[in-house]
Amino acid sequence: MSGLRESALGPVRVLTLARPPGNALDLAALAALRAALGRAVGDPSVRALVLDSEIPRYFSSGLDLAELAALPEARRREPFESLLEAYRDLLECPKPVVAALSGSALLGGWVLAMACDWRLAAPTAKVSLAEIRAALTPTSALIGRLSSLAGDPRAVKEMVLRGKALGATEALAAGLLDEVVPEAEVRPAARALAARLAKSPPRAFAAVKRALNAAAAAEGVRRRALEEFSAVFAGDEAKEGVAALRDKRRPRWEGA
C-alpha cells in the first residue's frame, strides 16, 4: 500500500496522505507522492494541487524511522534522499500547491509542507524541524528554506537549535503559515483556495514560481544537503538519536 490517495475536484488534483497512524513517510509513500506529482504536472487539465491528510492528528510525522533502522547501513541515507527529491519536486511543480495541515507537520512532514506554495493549518497543528533531537541536521538547504519563509529569525533558531515545535499561532506569527482556520475547515479551505489559484495564468505562474524557488531547488543545494546529512548520520550520536526517537525514550549521549 502506497499510503497516498488521489482525487480530482474539477481542475484541482488532491493528493491525500493516508498511512495510519501518523503518515510516516516510507520509501513507498515518497515514491507514490513523486509519481502522483509527475502525473499532475503532465496533465493539462490539472491547474492546481492540494496536499492533505486523512489522519486527524497528523499531516505527517516525518520519515519512517522503523524502515530507516531496518535498512542495511549502505542504504540508510535513501529515505532522506527520497524526501529531498519529493521536496524538490514540490518546489519545481509549475502549478500552485496548497498544503492543508489539519494535523501536525513534523520533521519530514514539515519539509514537504515548506515546499508548498501556501500552508493552511488547524489551531491544534504543530510544525517542527527538530532533527537535532535525533542528533541529525536538517541541513543548510532546509534551514535556508525555513529562514526564507520565516519573518522572525528567533523562531528559526528555536526550531533548529533547540528542537522546539511551534504551535499554529506561533507559526503564523513567524510567517511560516499563511492562515489558521478551524480544524473542520482546513481541507475545504485549502481546496477552495486551490480552485481560485487554478484560475491563474499558467505560464506566468510557472515562471514566477520558478524564479521564486530557484535558489532552494538548485541541484548543488540538494547535493550539499545530502553530503551534510550523510556526514552527521554516519556518527554514533545519530545512531543513538534515531534509536531513541524510534523507541520514544530519552537519548543517552554519554555513550554515543
Image (cartoon, rainbow, N blue to C red):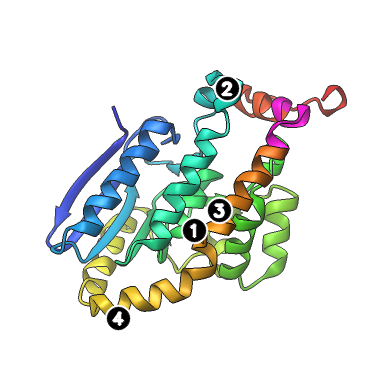
Do the residues bearing badges 2 and 3 touch, measured as CB atoms within 8 Å?
A: no
**Is 237 contained in the magenta span?**
yes
Main structural element of the magenta stretch: helix, strand or loop? helix
**Hey, what amino acid is under mark 4?**
Ala
Q: Residue shown at 31%/77% (left/top)?
A: 205
- In the rendered structure, the answer to whether residue 106 lies left or right of residue 199 reads right
Q: Nearer the viewer, mark 2 or mark 3?
A: 3
Could you classify mark 1 by the number of other residues whose Cα lies within 10 Å: few (under 14), some (14-19), or many (20 or more)?
Answer: many
The mark tally for this picture is 4
Give the image location of residue 229, x and y in percent: 65, 42
- Residue 210 lies, with reference to residue 25, above or below; the image says below
- Which residue is labeled 3 in the image? 222
Quadrant where the image shows the N terminus? top left
Amino acid residing under circle 2: Ala
The earlier-in-sequence mark between 1 and 4 is 1
Work out how far the residue at label 1 is from the one at label 4, CA to CA, in angstroms: 22 Å
If you read the primary sequence from the N terminus, does the residue marked by circle 1 or circle 3 appear first?
1
Q: Which mark is residue 69?
A: 2
Q: Amino acid at mark 3?
A: Arg
The residue tagged with tag 1: helix, strand or loop? helix
Q: CA distance from mark 4 to mark 2?
A: 44 Å
Secondary structure of the residue carrying numbered label 4: helix
Does the magenta portion include 67?
no
Q: Is residue 188 left or right of residue 166?
A: left
Residues in magenta, as a range: 232-240
Q: CA distance from mark 2 to mark 1?
A: 25 Å
Query: Residue 245, labelled with which disc?
Result: none
Q: Label 4: which residue? A: 204
Q: Which residue is mark 1?
A: 114
